[in-house]
């Protein structure tokens, strides 16, 4: 199987950010797989290109795999693009790339903008090590569990946030992670580009006073360095209580310890050791 798959990063707002390689790859492509053809047609029109274009998003991506065989067999090229930024990063395309590799097609990544990286390097927060979480879970309960698992994460954390979700999510972040330093980036590379830096509470205050438009990226400072072991006081009491509740349901101590450790971002062995101590005290 011959053929090529270009994975092309496109501008997140400013069309001047389109690279020469991206323009050339789009020009060579026999087919463009676009997250939303209505968005990508604007880019193609800007470049003066007329291309066969097919939508490729979360709910129809599997149906587009046959196109890889069709184009690849003839030695042609496919361009994979999302609405903005780098494909596959919180965007569709994973199945396409995996299938192309399986078929023996040449996979060619064309670098370009990424909202997560741009927000990170503009945040003023540590960039050496970071954790990209994408969009948080939709259900509130799942969101709280997600944040709880990040509580002791020392790396800088990056979330994508829809504007209508911002107020509620910031409140959850402050409740669970504390009033950390953060940066809210919005409308990056566009006319109204803005970076709101400060504590989570101060960002919440700004957001509460005016309407925030455009998709946002929230960059949050990691936890202070710790030995990742259960502390004392309320947190320790809470962990012991949750361990006992899980064990009462019939769960083994090791399994319960692993679950709690993951939820709180703690050492599995430390939580298990705490469970052993509590068990000894209750039987002593």
Image (cartoon, helix red, strand yellow):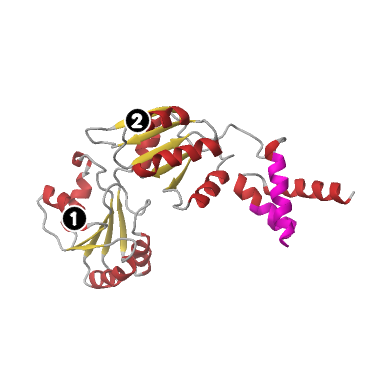
Q: Which mark is residue 277?
A: none
Question: Residue 183: which quarter of the image?
Answer: top left
Where residue 166 sits in the image (x, y, percent)? 39, 40
Where residue 36 sits in the image (x, y, percent)? 24, 57
Residue 258 lies within the magenta run:
yes
Task: Using the numbered discs, state the Cα–Cα distance from disc 1 to disc 2 in whole angstroms.
Answer: 29 Å
The local crowd at label 1, few if under 14, some if 14 to 19, many if 20 or more residues have their Cα within 10 Å, is few
Label 1 residue SS? helix
The main secondary structure of the magenta stretch is: helix
Residue 47 lies within the magenta run:
no
**Residue visible at 31% across and 35% down in the picture:** 211
The local crowd at label 2, few if under 14, some if 14 to 19, many if 20 or more residues have their Cα within 10 Å, is some
Compared across the picture, whether 185 is left or right of 73 comes to right
Where residue 88 sits in the image (x, y, percent)? 36, 54
Q: Which residues are magenta?
A: 236-259
| Residue 20 visible within the image | yes
**Residue visible at 55% across and 39% down in the picture:** 176
**Label 1, on which residue?**
38
Compared across the picture, whether 166 is left or right of 46 comes to right
Where residue 221 sits in the image (x, y, percent)? 49, 33
**Label 2, on which residue?**
195
**Earlier-in-chain disc, 1 versus 2:** 1
């Amino acid at each position: 199987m011959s053929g090529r798959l270009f994975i092309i990063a496109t501008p997140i707002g400013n069309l001047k950010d389109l690279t020469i390689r991206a323009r050339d790859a789009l020009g060579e492509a026999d087919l463009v797989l676009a997250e939303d053809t209505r968005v990508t047609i604007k880019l193609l029109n800007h470049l003066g290109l007329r291309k066969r274009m097919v939508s490729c998003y979360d709910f129809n991506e599997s149906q587009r795999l046959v196109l890889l065989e069709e184009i690849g067999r003839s030695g042609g090229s496919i361009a994979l693009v999302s609405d903005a930024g780098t494909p596959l990063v919180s965007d569709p395309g994973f199945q396409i790339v995996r299938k192309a590799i399986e078929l023996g097609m040449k996979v060619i990544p064309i670098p370009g903008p990424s909202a997560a990286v741009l927000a990170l390097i503009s945040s003023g927060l540590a960039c050496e090590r970071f954790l990209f979480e994408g969009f948080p879970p939709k259900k509130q309960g799942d969101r709280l569990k997600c944040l709880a698992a990040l509580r002791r994460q020392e790396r800088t954390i990056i979330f994508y946030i829809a504007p209508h979700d911002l107020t509620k999510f910031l409140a959850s972040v402050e409740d669970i992670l504390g009033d950390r330093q953060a940066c809210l980036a919005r409308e990056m590379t566009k006319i109204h580009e803005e970076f709101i830096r400060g504590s989570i509470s101060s960002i919440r205050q700004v957001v509460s006073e005016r309407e925030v438009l455009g998709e946002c990226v929230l960059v949050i400072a990691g936890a202070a360095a710790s030995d990742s072991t259960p502390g004392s006081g309320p947190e320790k009491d809470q962990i012991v209580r949750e361990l006992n509740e899980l064990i009462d349901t019939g769960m083994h101590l090791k399994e319960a310890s692993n679950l709690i450790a993951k939820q709180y971002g703690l050492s599995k062995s430390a939580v298990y050791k705490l469970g052993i101590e509590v068990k000894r005290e209750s039987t002593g």
